[in-house]
Structures are given as structure tokens and as C-alpha cells.
Amino acid sequence: MKNRDYTITITVDETPEEVFDAINNARGWWSGEIDGDTDRLGAEFTYRYGDLHYSKQEITELLPGKKVVWRVKEAEINFVEEKQEWKGTDIVFDIAARDAKTELTFTHIGLVPQIECYHSCTDAWSKLIRGNLRRLIATGMTQSDALV
């Protein structure tokens, strides 16, 4: 079996700049608690989802309208045996104009089928990217707005 990093692609009507801005508003689409800046090169932020997931990301690449990369510096995923599976992985958002639309390719480098959290983590990413992030891009509605 190949080491295939998890990747999904969505296409939206909004501009690459609008997609970029939505990605960097992580609180608007990523369920859980976020502490720190999510929109500045070199910034670090933590993410926590109850007792199940903790991670610390550093923004290592930030190219307006083109690309965002988060390096996972720390991780503790409490529903798998190897709790630090995400540590050292990269979460990559590639943005490209395609005709009159924008294509967003999300890749979690290091999230591969051989690791224990692959299926549950890819299910979660799919819901976040195809659901919460797509809604934020298209409507400006954050996840908390959608709950009201």
C-alpha cells in the first residue's frame, strides 16, 4: 500500500482571496477551541476538541490567494494508541483560480492509511472542508452562526 496523504478538492464560486481569507479564519470553520493567531506567518496556535484532540500548529507558509501551510508541532489524539500521530505533519491548503471559479486542494501530509486515526480523521476533515469551510467561503457564515 502506498503512503497516500489525505487530499480532497472543492471548487467554489468565490475568488482565491476570499478562499484564503476564510481558511485563515480557522475559528469560523474548524470545530473546537483555538488559541492564538491563525492568519500570520510564523504564528502558532493551539487547537483543542474536548479531551479527544490537542494540537499546536505553526503557520509556515502564507501566500495570499495561493497557499497556506500549518506544521503540526505538538499533538495528542486520545482516541488512538499512538497519540502523537499528527506531530510533524503538514496541513496544506493550495488555492488556484480555475476558469471563473476557485479550486481549493486540501492535503494533510502525513495523514496516511497506515496510521490508526486515518479513517476517523479523514471523515472529520471531509466534513470540515466540504461543510464548514465551504459554507464560510460561500456565505461568510461561521460554524457558530450556523448553530443559531
Image (spheres, rainbow, N blue to C red):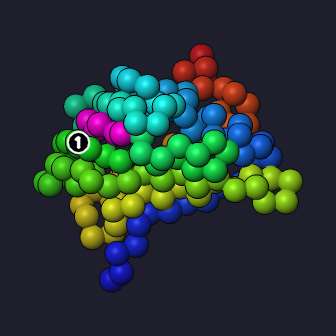
Displayed quadrant of residue 113: bottom left
Instruction: Count the labels in the image.
Output: 1
Residue furthest top as drawn: 148
Q: Main secondary structure of the magenta part?
A: strand
Q: Residues within 10 Å of mark 1 (few under 14, many from 20)?
A: some
Is residue 91 rendered to the left or right of residue 132? left
- Give the left or right position of residue 28, taking residue 1 as reference: right
Residue drawn at x 35%, y 47% is 71
User: Which residue is most to the bottom?
Assistant: 1
Residue 122, placed above or below residue 124: below
The residue shown at (36%, 81%) is 2
Observer-nearest residue: 82 or 60? 60
Q: Is residue 90 magenta?
A: no
Which residue is rendered at x = 43% and y = 25% of the image?
37
Q: Which residue is mark 1?
A: 74
Residue closer to the observer: 47 or 39: 39
Provide residue 85's location: percent of width, then percent of height: 22, 54
Which region shows up in magenta?
54-58
Q: Nearer the viewer, residue 82 or 99?
A: 99
In percent of width and height, residue 40 lies at 48, 31
Camera sees residue 106: yes
Q: Residue furthest right?
A: 100
In this rendering, the answer to whether 4 lies above or below 48 is below
In this rendering, does residue 79 appear at all? no
